[in-house]
Image (cartoon, rainbow, N blue to C red):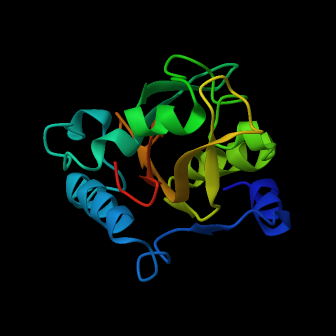
Amino acid sequence: MSSRLDDEIRESTYPRIVGFGFLDNCSPKIRRMWDYWNTQRGDRLMPSRQDIDPLQIPRDLLPCIILTEVLPEAPWLRYRLVGTAQAALRGRDPTGQPVQGNYMGAHLGIPGDDVMLNYRIVIEKRTVVYTYNPIIGAMPDGSSMRQMPWHASSSVLMPLSSDGENVDMVFCFSDLDKDGLHP
């Protein structure tokens, strides 16, 4: 893999764990979603999009998922499906929009380079990325001055591949809650 990517990972101060080292310290919801992804992949490096069946995902986790399509040219990443809790955290539904500028935390000024690096790691290294960067959601008007009671404590980004080799989608799950209550 790219030594440039490895250098960028080393230089980044964004709170992330690359690979499966997060499993002993993640929330029960993150663990349940990872267990689902892991079961779907079986003995393969990663499952395909067709292996992800919303009817098999526990109902309490569905509002917190995102499917991101990997495109062959700019804008490179596009949200294909954004769960209702994910949309509420952003104050709008970014389904169909590019990730750049529409990612969780954009309203707080979290640098897009760090978010895009998370996706690059998943895509280029074909591995899982766990992030733990607490975020408070925006108001529906997009204002970051007044905050809704939606919170994200951590997320896991997991690769999907239709050919078993190249990542063409990223399956994301965030541990979200509202006023301390799970969605």
Quadrant housing residue 90: top right
User: In the orientation shown, which residue stands out farthest toward the bottom?
Assistant: 24
- Residue 91 appears in view: yes
Residue 166 place in picture, x, y as percent: 47, 39
Q: Quadrant of the N terminus?
A: bottom right
Vertical position of residue 127 compared to residue 140: above or below: below
Q: Is residue 29 left or right of residue 57?
A: right
Give the residue drawn at x 44%, y 61%. 180
Residue 131 place in picture, x, y as percent: 59, 62
Q: Is residue 180 left or right of residue 121?
A: left
Query: Between residues 149 and 93, which one lies in front from this camera angle?
Result: 149
Residue 7 place in picture, x, y as percent: 83, 63
Query: Between residues 155 and 166, which one lies in front from this camera angle?
Result: 155
- Residue 83 appears in view: no
Residue 23 place in picture, x, y as percent: 41, 76
Give the residue drawn at x 68%, y 21%. 75
Q: Is residue 104 left or right of residue 155?
A: right
